[in-house]
Every structure is written in structure tokens, then in C-alpha cells.
Image: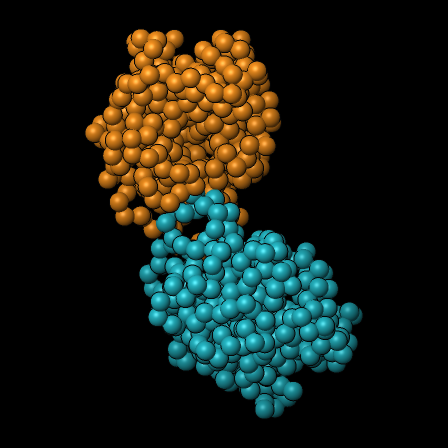
Chain colours: A cyan, B orange
Amino acid sequence: MPGSSVNRRIVLKSRPDGPPTPANFAMEEGPIAEPDDGEVLTRTLWLSLDPYMRGRMSDKKSYARPVPIGGVMVGGTVARVVATRDPGFAVGDIVVGSGGWQDYAVLPGRGLRKLDPTLAPISTAVGVLGMPGMTGYVGLLDIGRPRAGETVVVSAASGAVGSVVGQIAKIKECRVVGVAGGDEKCRYAVDVLGLDACVDHRAPELGEALARACPDGVDVYFESVGGAVQRAVWPLLNDFARVPVCGLIAQYNDAVPQPGPNFSSVLSKRLTVRGFIVSDHAERIGGFLRDVSAWVRDGRVKYREDIVEGLERAPDAFIGLLQGRNFGKLVVRVAS
Amino acid sequence: MPGSSVNRRIVLKSRPDGPPTPANFAMEEGPIAEPDDGEVLTRTLWLSLDPYMRGRMSDKKSYARPVPIGGVMVGGTVARVVATRDPGFAVGDIVVGSGGWQDYAVLPGRGLRKLDPTLAPISTAVGVLGMPGMTGYVGLLDIGRPRAGETVVVSAASGAVGSVVGQIAKIKECRVVGVAGGDEKCRYAVDVLGLDACVDHRAPELGEALARACPDGVDVYFESVGGAVQRAVWPLLNDFARVPVCGLIAQYNDAVPQPGPNFSSVLSKRLTVRGFIVSDHAERIGGFLRDVSAWVRDGRVKYREDIVEGLERAPDAFIGLLQGRNFGKLVVRVAS
């Protein structure tokens, strides 16, 4: 562990060309900054690793600015306040915010939300009760709009977002079919999360397997992966199906963009395809926290964390995330 | 003109492989059928020719059943009642319905709507005040949801649907940029329909021309063509842009489906892409007729018809429609 006067930070050393490698990252050490008026100094406890970070490593135009070369990698964090010049916070408070890949971060108080550590394990504030959970909640309910009896297919079904989507779709009385990588994740999706079926995207004849699991077609496809899974689901979409698009992890490392599905299906099936970013839906946080906290408490929404020990292991864990190596919400324990 | 005891009908002789040819159609003669209880015998006055008919000539799965080989080609018609066994109709009534490519049709009364010929030229009931006009109205207003000051791009801007879209978008105080084939149609879109600009899709560097015409990007792209126009518009779409998809005429003759745009733009720009078929929105007919009739009366919505004389010319005119040879709403005068 670092001495208390040193801040370790992981910066973007170079932009990846294809899959990121350890050489794209560098660990640096520096002094711990002081908070200014309205700011808070936080000690990172948990760092969230999420697929969107691949986009920030790239400098092509997107919805958010890229991390500059030499800049600290961005990321959601759960942290403890160690100094404060914002009267809304006290030393010792546990907060969730965007501290990035580092031991300490000085952050504006208005960007932080205080947590009550007695309500739920604090790491869930970057998982099932945080950005990934809210992505699933908003995307499924507001964009997917599932109705009881419909079939919902969710990609990355054992992951941070997909596991929330699948379980909420079950609460909404849908038939829910997951897609996940490998037997173990598929068994988990069915046996623990309660999905009706789960198809291994690595299996040969994915399309046929998915068609068997969706005898009535697909009404909502919650898209977070793109690529082969998208191609397998597309022909199964029913008339008036909805496709919330929250990610395309299978395509993030592509040098040449993959074409999308032919639009004749969009027309003839009257599909709605809609991309969304959870931060555009901040007004839903109240409903999300109320509903999902209750479902977690009563066991209707389960979650699984894949915990990596130590900030220095974040680059390797992130590289693995893009390959599907994690099992559950990937978080780094930066300090206890 | 045919004798009154003979019904000429144009049937689908064979399915086209690529662009339809005259050999895909055949003119047949037969007796005029008699109406049964609840049915009406109608004499076709106007036959509408519309791009969707290309889909019905094909037997691949779509939202509507294909025309069977040997079956009469489907089509919207304005017709005069010549015999009736539906008490809701009298001989001499002018009705709009789906009589197909033939001189006479026996139709269920419940599928017909009576027209008041003093309100508007009756041919408009298959044009600006009919299915194409309503397609533009519903697609732009309900799916495109344009706001004042936004930029709307409309493909096939001088056509039956596009001309309605463009003019309603102007009424809604948008910047409206049309795309049309050739100088004459483009001049018409600007000078007569009042669009802010119109770009010739046959011009070299379509993308650059369109970018110059849309300095603030594109908020609504009303899609009816696909192909090169779609590829030119896509990079110009703004965050949260809406893309109502009502047709893909440039792709209807493709043997191999063209891929669609890469989905990363759908995600990063939070696009909404939604296919629609006007018949799913029948509940909007009241609002459509009220609004667009008023706009036509006060000159805010203008229309142009491309009139073909004689049923026997329908196949050639339809083939031309798919090549953009018509200028305005294509209708066949089957009888006076």
C-alpha cells in the first residue's frame, strides 16, 4: 500500500490500436493534491471497471471527451472523504463519484453522492445500485418497455448491466433468454439469476440455439455487445420489437467499423432501435434507487462481483473485461 | 376503353429478380364480378402507384402477404360505386379503397371510405390526402418529433410522401433540406414547396453538398430511400437525432441486402431509428385529414401529381417510379 503522502495514478500512456495492452497504461506517483473551496479530497476504496472506458482511450468523436495522453484514466469510484472544503461533507463520509484510476482524488462536492454504508455493501454503488444497474433499469424499462409475456433477450447476461436487465425482465413477467460466454456464466444466469434460458455465444450455431430458446421470437433485445450476438438475434426479432443499445463491447476494438443490420428489417418489422447513455437519464435515479434497492433487499435482484485486489492490477483486469474474462461486476479494491 | 361487361386486370405473371420488367406483368380480361352481401362493385377511376408495391411482388417475408402469381396487383384506388349490396353506399358514390390494378373491383363496404368530391380533387385521396400524405404526417410528427429550429432532411423530397414531410416540417418552423433526383425536382422543392435547400442525389460529392446545406447537422432524417443518401446523411446526424424509416426505395431491387450503418453511431449519438407502416397508425386518420386538408386549402401544403393515362400503362409507370422517373405523386387515370 502507498504511503499516505503519495498518490499512485494510472494514466493513459498511448492510444490502443485494436485491443488495449498493458503498454497503453502507466503507473505514476505524485503528491496528493489539496482540495480547494467546494472540493473534497477522497481516498479511493473501490474502482469500477466498465466497458465504456475503451471509448475514452480512443480519440475518435464520441459522446464524451477522450482521456488525454498522460491523463488519469476515468472511472467511477467509491471513496472515503479524508479532507473537505465542501460543508456538505465530513471526513469519514463514504461517497460515490468519478475519482478515476488513482489512490486519491480531489473532486467537486457537487459531483459526489453520500452513501449510507449500513444499507448495502458500499461497492454496490458502482454496480447493481450504481451506473451499471441504472443502465439496465432505464434501458430495459424506459426504452425496451417490456410487457408481461414478451420475450426479452439480454446479451452479457451475467454481467453488471445484463444481470440487472434479466432479473428486472423476470420481475416484469417476461420470458428472458440470456446470452453469455461459457457454460459457467450460462448456468449462473439460469440457476442464480432465474432466467428462463441462457445461450453460450461461443457455441457453434449460435443462431439455431437462440432460435430454439426463443420459440415466440424476440420482443426486446437489450444490446450491449454487437457483433455475432447481434447478427444471431436480428432475424428473430418480432414485429414492433425494441432494441435499446447501451454498448457494443464486441466491436470496441475493431479498427474498421462493422456494418449494422440491413434496414429492410427495421422497416418491415417496424423496429425501434435506440441508443442511450445512462447519464442522459439522471432524473430517473430516484426511481432506480428505490426500486432496485428494494429488489436487492428482498432477493429478487441478485448480484455478483468479480473483485480484483490492488490498483496496479486494474489495467490487466480491464483488458480481461473486454475479452469477457470477468464473471460479474468487475471492481478493484484499491484500499480497505 | 373496355366494354362495360369486361374487367381488365393486371396480374403478377412472375416475380422479379432485381428490377421489375414488363414481362413480370400480364394484362388479362374477364367478366365483371357481382357483389355479395356487404360488398360493393366499384369502377376504378384512379389507381395509385407506390414504391411499397415492389415488396408485394416479392415472396420474401414482409409485413404484408405477397401478391400470388396470377393474382391482381394490389393498389389503392379512387372509384365510383356501380352496384352495391352494402346499405352504407349508393350507386354513384365516390370511394377510396384498395381495388388493385383493374377496371372493376368487388370490395367489402367496410374497407371503403366515401369521398366528398366538392372538397378536393378526388385523386388526392390516394395522394396528399391519402396513404402517402398520412405516411409523411405520422412519420414526421409522431416519430420524427421535430422541434422549431431543428434541421430536418427529407429524402425523395418532391415525391408523394417527401413533399408532405418537407412542407409540414416548414410549418413546424424547422430548417428543411430535401434530397431529390435532378435539378428540376430540386428547384421545385425549394421554389414551390418552400424548402430551405435541396441537394441532388445524383451530384458527385453528395456528402459534402449535404453537409454544406446542413451547417448545424441533422436532427430528423426522414428515410424513404436508403442507399447512398442514407450513407451521406448518417455522419451528419446530431446527438438524439430521430430517423423514421418509411421506405428504402433505393434498395428494393437489391438481390443481396445492403448492410446498414455501423451501430456505434446509434450508441454514441443516442439515435432513435424506427421503422413504421402507416396502416399501424389508423387512429391518426382524423387528425391527419383535419390538419392536412386545412393546409392544402390555405396553400401551405402544395402537391403535384404525375398522371399516367390508361391502366395498360401502369406496369411501365411503376417500373419508372422505382427509377425516380416520375415527378410528383404517380397516379394512373383508369377512367374519367
Quadrant holding the N terminus of chain B = top left
Residue A319 or A86: which is nearer the viewer? Answer: A319
Q: Residue A132's x, y, as percent?
A: 58, 67
Residue B183 or A329: which is nearer the viewer? Answer: A329
Q: Is residue A298 visible?
A: yes
Above-or-below relation of A110 to A5: above
Q: How many marks?
A: 0
Quadrant housing residue B202: top left
Residue most extreme to the left: B23
Quadrant housing residue B322: top left
Quadrant holding the C terminus of chain B = top left
The residue located at (54%, 73%) in the rendering is A189
Q: Residue B257's x, y, as percent?
A: 31, 48
Q: Is residue A34 left or right of residue A261?
A: right
Q: Is residue A72 left or right of residue A256?
A: right
Quadrant housing residue A141: bottom right
Q: Residue B313's x, y, as percent?
A: 27, 19
The residue located at (33%, 41%) in the rendering is B59
Q: Is residue A53 visible?
A: no
The residue located at (47%, 59%) in the rendering is A215
The residue located at (39%, 72%) in the rendering is A202
Q: Residue B167's x, y, as percent?
A: 49, 26
Above-or-below relation of A35 to B104: below
Above-or-below relation of A94 to B64: below
Q: Is residue A112 left or right of residue B143?
A: right
Above-or-below relation of A13 to A216: below
